[in-house]
């Protein structure tokens, strides 16, 4: 029997369904082995330098965010991408506040394990200011990405998202982890802390 274009077109839905089925089986297999993390994204940026992005201004009295800040960083940075209109972002406020407070607490003989920076996505300054007030002004740097261009360069697909960036003199900051969904104690301990502990 000779295969025609009609036969091939008729087979496409079946092939697509088979591909989805195999993908689902791989996810289930990963869950069973404890290797599937729905929050972790293997993006092209993971392991790469911080992307070029437009310089971002901030709210009055706060430092903005530029590409140069990542080139000159001396400690790991956890970059939180958020917006006041995002319900999961509002829900993550308690952990963000707790993390910021723990990082600001006096430490003996060592610096804080990382800096907490923010990227506010497509938000109004007044609304962002209210969110920050509720969170206890957690970020030491904050960029207002009102047109969303910086988020595009970072590969953000929605909020909240987070990136862990390690200092790297040659690369000017290297992204080692990218996760979606609100930050929680569990995510921080299982996904962020291991990178911090492995750092030289």
Image: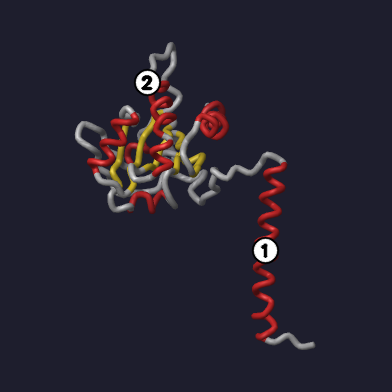
Near-viewer residue (106 or 12): 12
The residue singled out by tag 2 in the image is 104
Q: Which mark is residue 115?
A: none
Picture coordinates of residue 186, whole percent (x, y): 55, 31
Can residue 11 be seen here?
Answer: yes
In this rendering, the answer to whether 47 lies above or below 196 is: below
Which of marks 2 and 1 precedes in the sequence?
1
Can residue 199 be seen here?
Answer: no
Picture coordinates of residue 7, whole percent (x, y): 70, 83
Q: Residue at x 51, y 40 (%)?
A: 177
Picture coordinates of residue 133, whole percent (x, y): 29, 31
Picture coordinates of residue 32, whole percent (x, y): 72, 42
Q: Residue at x 30, y 41 (%)?
A: 143
- Left or right: 49, with 131 as reference point: right
- Left or right: 200, with 1 as reference point: left
Q: Residue at x 68, y 39 (%)?
A: 34
Near-viewer residue (38 or 64): 38
Image colouring:
secondary structure
**Badge 1: residue crowd in 10 Å (few <14, some 14–19, many ≥20):** few
Label 2 residue SS: helix
Near-viewer residue (8 or 87): 87
The residue singled out by tag 1 in the image is 19
Most distant residue in the left direction = 60
Check the picture and name the quadrant holding the N terminus.
Answer: bottom right
Q: Residue at x 44, y 52 (%)?
A: 157
């Amino acid at each position: 029997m000779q295969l025609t274009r009609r036969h091939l077109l008729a087979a496409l839905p079946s092939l697509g369904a088979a591909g989805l089925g195999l993908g689902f089986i791989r996810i289930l297999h990963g869950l069973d082995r404890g290797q599937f993390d729905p929050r972790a994204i293997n993006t092209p940026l993971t392991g790469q330098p911080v992307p070029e992005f437009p310089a971002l201004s901030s709210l009055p009295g706060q430092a903005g965010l530029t590409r140069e800040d990542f080139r000159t960083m001396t400690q790991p940075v956890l970059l939180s991408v958020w917006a006041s209109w995002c319900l999961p972002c509002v829900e993550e406020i308690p952990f963000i506040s707790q993390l910021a407070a723990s990082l600001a607490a006096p430490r003996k003989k060592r610096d804080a394990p990382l800096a907490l920076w923010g990227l506010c996505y497509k938000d109004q300054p007044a609304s962002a200011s209210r969110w920050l007030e509720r969170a206890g002004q957690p970020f030491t740097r904050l960029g207002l990405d009102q047109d969303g261009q910086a988020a595009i360069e970072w590969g953000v697909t929605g909020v909240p998202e987070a990136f862990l960036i390690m200092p790297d003199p040659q690369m000017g900051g290297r992204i080692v982890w990218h996760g979606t969904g609100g930050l929680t104690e569990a995510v921080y301990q299982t996904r962020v802390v291991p990178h911090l502990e492995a750092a030289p």
